[in-house]
Image (cartoon, grey):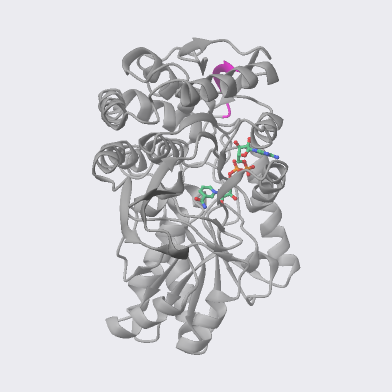
């Protein structure tokens, strides 16, 4: 483990009502998934801490000017971006140690890009058209001037997973706070330090008023459930598995609380018959190994022309076998460890299932090291899109290769999924590749390696991949209510 800089192993606290405090349920360990060693402990929030955090967020929303003071919000977000940037190397070390994120990725989507995105939301808060004049009309014979007013939703419950701890937390904090809400953030039990470090910097180095941001780390998933069903919460913004998303939606239904869900995926990487097969297969191989396949939007089904299937299998296996799977502190690593023994068991369970379903493990499948929760980059062939490994989210460096019989068939297979999060299309004829991308029912698509991820691009899923959009203006508007005021004219 590299130096954790200003962070000490037992310094992680809750952030409640502007203050750092211990958790009433004691402390719980956080583990380095690359070494299996306990890094230290984090504050374990009890139900009473959560109650305090929601109460503080409620008061900060109801009793202060936060929701109306756009300039203060923009200032606080910009300052947060500066502080996180100044502590970039400290946060980088924490993220690598706790989440097993390869350090190279922290220079992109795992840290630096989402931190930079805070300034975009600060800018948007200032530029947004909060009031829109509909003009004078005479509805039902009454001459009236109507104004559409956009207002913050209120108290936001933000519940996040472990795989992109900073990206997902900031993709909720940025737009929710810019829109004028107050937030209770509940991160995943596997990555409490990443969130607690942000909490400490908010408390010590920013100007957020007390109660505007609250961060409750907990070993207990039940704290998330309590948060989702609390009647003082106005909006639940959840990122995680589809199964948990269903529970969150059911809990929120108790009080008909608005929900916003970013869930799982099983995205297709479509290789058209005019594509450069070798480079497309190489890209698909690198994609599925990024952060050991622990990304909801990674492409995990590789659809290749049937006539070139065997060549594609050989090309993909050759690249996967050469991908370095190891130490996340090494700048050359893209495939680090899985987050936990439980997650590795789950991935290995799917590999056994693939064989049981009649599939073939072409390469990988083993554990490359004695220590750390690693699984080798793996290619599964010989199964069709009906197999469970082609339908269910594995969340490991595992690619399933499936033949297709032309563009229509590729679109059919890509869309034959309970999920609809992302995807990729590769072909030499750009118009044709674009047309295929247009027919795939997912929230994001990459054509020939182009990148969609940025603060201004909405991200989210069709079907069981979610409800709503994160980031972009659409993501900001998820955190708003709409009101119409009519006055005599
Ligand atoms: P998870 O669903 O197990 O947990 C996510 C969060 O929900 C955690 O904070 C957890 O403590 C909390 N939680 C668990 N049970 C709860 C309940 N009943 N009520 C309220 N909160 C509860 O997910 P995970 O294992 O942490 O993360 C991996 C999953 O996240 C994958 O399925 C992945 O696809 C998904 N994910 C989706 C996106 C996206 O934007 N679509 C992004 C990243 C990860």
The verdict on residue 296 being magenta is no
Q: Which residues are magenta?
A: 36-44
Looking at the image, the residue that sits furthest to the right is 356
Q: Position of residue 9 (x, y in %)?
A: 49, 14
Q: Residue furthest front?
A: 141
Vertical arrangement, residue 269 with respect to residue 286, above or below: below
Point out the quarter of the image occupied by ligand 1: top right
Examine the rendering and report whether any part of residue 455 can be seen: no
Residue 210: percent from the left, percent from the top? 44, 16
Query: Magenta includes 43?
Result: yes
Q: Quadrant of the N terminus?
A: top left
Q: Residue at x 50, y 62 (%)?
A: 421
In the depicted view, which residue is nearer to us: 296 or 469?
A: 469
Instruction: Give the residue at x 45% y 47%.
Output: 483
Q: Position of residue 93 (x, y in %)?
A: 38, 27
- Closer to the camera, 40 or 43? 43
Residue 333's image quarter?
Answer: top left
**Secondary structure mainly formed by the magenta segment:** strand
């Amino acid at each position: 483990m590299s130096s954790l800089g200003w962070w000490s192993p037992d310094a992680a606290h809750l952030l409640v009502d502007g203050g750092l405090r211990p958790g009433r349920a004691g402390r719980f360990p956080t583990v380095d998934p690359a070494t299996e060693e306990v890094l230290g402990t984090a504050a374990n929030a009890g139900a009473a801490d959560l109650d305090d955090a929601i109460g503080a967020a409620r008061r900060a929303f109801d009793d202060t000017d936060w929701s109306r003071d756009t300039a203060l919000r923009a200032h606080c977000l910009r300052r947060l971006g500066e502080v996180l940037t100044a502590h970039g190397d400290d946060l980088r070390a924490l993220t690598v140690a706790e989440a097993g994120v390869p350090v190279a990725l922290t220079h992109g989507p795992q840290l630096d890009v989402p931190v930079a995105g805070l300034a975009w939301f600060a800018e948007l808060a200032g530029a947004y058209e909060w009031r829109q004049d509909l003009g004078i009309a005479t509805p039902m014979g009454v001459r009236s001037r109507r104004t559409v007013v956009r207002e913050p939703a209120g108290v936001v419950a933000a519940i996040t997973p472990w795989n992109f701890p900073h990206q997902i937390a900031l993709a909720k904090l940025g737009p929710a706070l810019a829109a004028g809400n107050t937030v209770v953030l509940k991160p995943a039990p596997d990555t409490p330090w990443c969130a607690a470090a942000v909490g400490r910097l908010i408390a010590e180095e920013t100007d957020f008023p007390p109660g505007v941001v609250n961060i409750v780390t907990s070993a207990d998933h039940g704290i998330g459930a309590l948060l989702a069903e609390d009647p003082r919460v106005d909006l639940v913004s959840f990122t995680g598995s589809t199964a948990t998303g269903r529970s969150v939606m059911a809990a929120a239904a108790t009080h008909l609380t608005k929900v916003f869900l970013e869930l799982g995926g099983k995205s297709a990487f479509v290789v058209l018959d005019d594509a450069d097969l070798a480079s497309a297969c190489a890209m698909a191989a690198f994609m599925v190994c990024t952060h050991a396949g622990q990304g909801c939007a990674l492409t995990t089904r590789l659809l290749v022309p049937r006539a070139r299937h065997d060549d594609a299998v050989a090309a993909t296996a050759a690249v996967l076998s050469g991908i370095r799977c190891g130490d996340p502190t090494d700048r050359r690593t893209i495939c680090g460890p899985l987050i936990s023994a439980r997650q590795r068991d789950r991935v290995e369970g799917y590999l056994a299932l693939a064989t049981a379903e009649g599939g073939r493990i072409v390469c990988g499948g083993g554990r490359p090291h004695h220590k750390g929760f690693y699984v080798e980059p793996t290619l599964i062939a010989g199964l069709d899109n009906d197999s469970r490994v082609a339908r269910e989210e594995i969340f490991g460096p595992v690619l399933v290769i499936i033949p297709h019989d032309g563009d229509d068939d590729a679109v059919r297979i890509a869309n034959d999924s309970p999920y609809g999060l992302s995807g990729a299309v590769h072909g030499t004829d750009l118009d044709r590749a674009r047309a295929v991308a247009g027919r795939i029912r997912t929230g994001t698509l990459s054509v020939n390696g182009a990148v969609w991820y940025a603060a201004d691009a909405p991200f989210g899923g069709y079907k069981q991949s979610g409800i709503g959009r994160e980031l972009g203006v659409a993501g900001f508007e998820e955190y708003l209510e709409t009101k119409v005021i009519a006055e005599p004219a």
